[in-house]
């Protein structure tokens, strides 16, 4: 398929996304949020916004079937396009890989080398949420003039980290403790990863990367020999009952010699590939955390530009791994958040509730009082570290970034490792394609696995490999702190042993009857907020009349399995109010399970934490989900 045909298909898909009838969240939301959710109401010619294609057309859609027809969408052949490299995911890893590929191709005079990047969000950055204090080492390698004052396209939204504080919190007090060397932020910068991703996307388009936001890759395609052939995007315009609507648009196939998966933590296609090629055969199970974040504008008199604060202890119980942060950046802006390890045992614990409690602690409340919360977001992150890294290369492609699990947990950083992994995969892919004589043969990126093991990614993750799993010991938090101190200051990863993770996160969940019930205080509406108020700050939007992307095969069976044992754990682990148990006397257990999928912020917690593993997160229609700001 020609580039012109592909672009015309993109035009059709864009108009379908823009004119959807949406359902508002189950509470009043601000006019600003409404405008942000539906920022374009008229049809107009193709335009570039923030370096991205946002095309529209007024051409009429064809009617395909009525509700009574037996039309099968699979009967329509999907349009396809052939590229050299297809990248799924427009975060730091995917964009770094794309930029590096085009740099190599352009340096070799191969300007026709096609690199195509698919992003499920409506615009790059819309689904990105992170702390974030970035270590700029990989960024300097990729774009040496990224913050050079002589560069008119430099990234300007940076705040140099000036001071580190580490605190242990009790319910009332804040106790200073030594800052581990891994958390020294000298030379690092506080940023909004959301803003940074948009900027990186502009640099990618400048160099010739083809970026298609609003295209949700939902299926891995395979060649006859079993190697990955590319990906397909999901169909648009399917009703909740599974029948095509007037707005139906068949998905598209993107075929590539190399497919790089950069989906972020717990990617849906990554799960499929890991299972098919048994990529975890030599690694331990992945373990995860849930990060919940708000961005505040605070009183200028309280603002300390460049301040980086981390805390541990309160409000989390001693059997739960996690900690809080507060970063002062920009002009009177504060990033505040809490990470909760998803291997927590008590099903009564609610990470969202713990975060609201944390903000009421005197150390944090002092800064937030008199301020205004302007944004909210949540996302899972990989915490397994070195021993949970799977095989990253597979026939026809590779895993890059957080989808492979390169987060350095003690350092609380993963952007630099994600970017570097993307660059390494790009170099391996270009070398493999440049040396391949047969255009039809499958490609295996042997060099990528070798490059990873020789890189700083491997070195730094191996050094801290025992810190996170050390918290699974009879002494809990205290034992973990003591051992991690020894690792940080004495052992430095040179010990001959590697501590194993205790198991899976869902398997760590105890029965509700075995645990103390946790009652959370009512939000005050000033420092702490109810969950739907927070969701309204995400800009989240899904068309209601589509198949539920949170797949539970049998809702009644799920309720019968989960409710008696865990008493609504889904409602508590979800940071967006997606899951509910509603009183229903017609049910044997007295409650009915309900999914409010339109609230979903794509954090993936449900897919990870649900004890019986019967919730599968899949991609909704392209362009849907949160529209984060400053996260």
Image: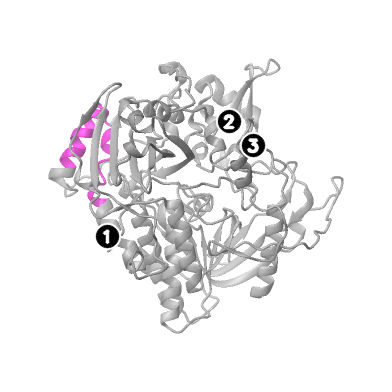
Element under disc 1: helix
Q: Main secondary structure of the magenta part?
A: helix
User: Is there a contact, CB below 8 Å, between mark 1 and mark 3?
Assistant: no
The circle drawn on residue 456 is: 1
The circle drawn on residue 553 is: 3
Location of residue 349 by image quarter: top left
Q: Position of residue 383 (x, y in %)?
A: 36, 43
Residue 395 visible, this angle: no
Residue 485 visible, this angle: yes
Whole-number angstrom distance, CA of label 2 to CA of label 3: 15 Å
Q: Earlier in the sequence, mark 1 or mark 3?
A: 1
Q: Is residue 308 above or below residue 461?
A: above
Q: Position of residue 629 (x, y in %)?
A: 50, 47
Extreme residue in the front direction? 301
User: Residue at horizontal 55%, vertical 25%?
Assistant: 562
Pointer 2 residue: 579
């Amino acid at each position: 398929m020609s580039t012109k045909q592909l672009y015309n298909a993109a035009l059709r898909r864009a108009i379908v996304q823009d004119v959807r009838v949406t359902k508002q969240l189950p509470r009043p939301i601000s006019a600003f949020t409404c405008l942000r959710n539906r920022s374009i109401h008229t049809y107009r010619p193709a335009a570039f916004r923030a370096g991205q294609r946002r095309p529209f057309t007024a051409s009429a859609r064809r009617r395909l079937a009525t509700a009574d027809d037996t039309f099968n969408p699979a009967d329509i052949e999907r349009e396809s396009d052939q590229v050299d490299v297809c990248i799924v995911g427009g975060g730091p890893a995917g964009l770094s890989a794309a930029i590096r590929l085009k740099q190599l191709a352009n340096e070799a005079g191969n300007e026709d080398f096609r690199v195509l990047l698919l992003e499920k969000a409506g615009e790059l950055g819309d689904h990105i949420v992170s702390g974030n204090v970035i270590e700029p080492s990989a960024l300097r390698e990729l774009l040496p003039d990224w913050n050079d004052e002589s560069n008119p396209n430099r990234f300007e939204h940076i705040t140099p980290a000036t001071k580190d504080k580490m605190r242990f919190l009790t319910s009332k007090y804040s106790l200073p403790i030594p800052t581990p060397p891994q958390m020294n932020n000298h030379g690092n910068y506080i940023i909004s990863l959301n803003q940074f991703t948009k900027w990186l996307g502009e640099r990618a388009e400048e160099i010739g990367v083809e970026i298609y936001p609003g295209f949700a890759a939902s299926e891995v395609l395979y060649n006859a020999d079993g190697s990955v052939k590319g990906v397909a995007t999901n169909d648009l315009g399917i009703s909740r009952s599974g029948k095509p609507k007037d707005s139906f648009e068949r998905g598209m196939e993107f075929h590539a010699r190399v497919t790089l998966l950069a989906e972020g933590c717990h990617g849906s296609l990554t799960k499929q590939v890991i299972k098919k090629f048994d990529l975890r055969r030599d690694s331990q199970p992945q373990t995860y955390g849930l990060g919940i974040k708000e961005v505040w504008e605070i009183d200028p008199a309280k603002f300390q530009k460049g301040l980086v604060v981390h805390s541990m202890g309160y409000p989390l119980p001693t059997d739960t791994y996690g900690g809080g942060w507060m970063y002062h950046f920009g002009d009177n802006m504060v990033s505040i958040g809490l990470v909760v390890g998803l291997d927590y045992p008590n099903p009564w614990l609610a990470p969202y509730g713990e975060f609201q409690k944390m903000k009421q602690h005197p150390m944090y409340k002092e800064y937030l009082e008199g301020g205004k919360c302007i944004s909210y977001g949540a996302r899972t992150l990989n915490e397994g570290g070195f021993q949970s890294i799977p095989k990253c290369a597979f026939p026809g492609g590779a895993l890059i970034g957080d989808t492979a699990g390169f987060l350095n947990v003690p350092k609380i950083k993963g952007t630099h490792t994600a970017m570097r992994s993307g660059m390494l995969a790009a170099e391996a892919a270009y070398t493999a394609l440049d040396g391949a004589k047969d255009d039809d043969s499958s490609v295996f990126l042997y060099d990528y696995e070798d490059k990873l093991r020789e890189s700083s990614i491997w070195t730094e993750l191996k050094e801290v490999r025992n810190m996170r799993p050390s918290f699974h010991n009879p002494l809990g938090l205290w034992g973990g702190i003591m051992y991690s101190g020894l690792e940080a200051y004495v052992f430095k990863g040179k010990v001959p042993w590697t501590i194993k993770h205790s198991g899976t996160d869902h398997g760590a969940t105890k029965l509700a009857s075995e645990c103390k019930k946790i009652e959370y205080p009512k939000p005050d509406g000033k420092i702490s907020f109810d969950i739907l108020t927070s969701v309204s700050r995400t800009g989240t939007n899904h068309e209601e009349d589509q198949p539920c992307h949170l797949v539970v095969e049998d809702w009644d069976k799920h309720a019968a399995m989960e409710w008696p044992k865990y008493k609504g754990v889904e409602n508590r682990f979800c940071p967006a109010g997606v899951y509910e148990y509603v009183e229903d006397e017609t049910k044997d257990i007295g409650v009915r399970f309900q999914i409010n999928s339109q609230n979903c912020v794509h954090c993936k917690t449900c897919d990870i934490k649900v004890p019986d593993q019967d919730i599968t997160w899949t991609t909704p229609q392209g362009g849907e989900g949160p529209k984060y700001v400053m996260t």
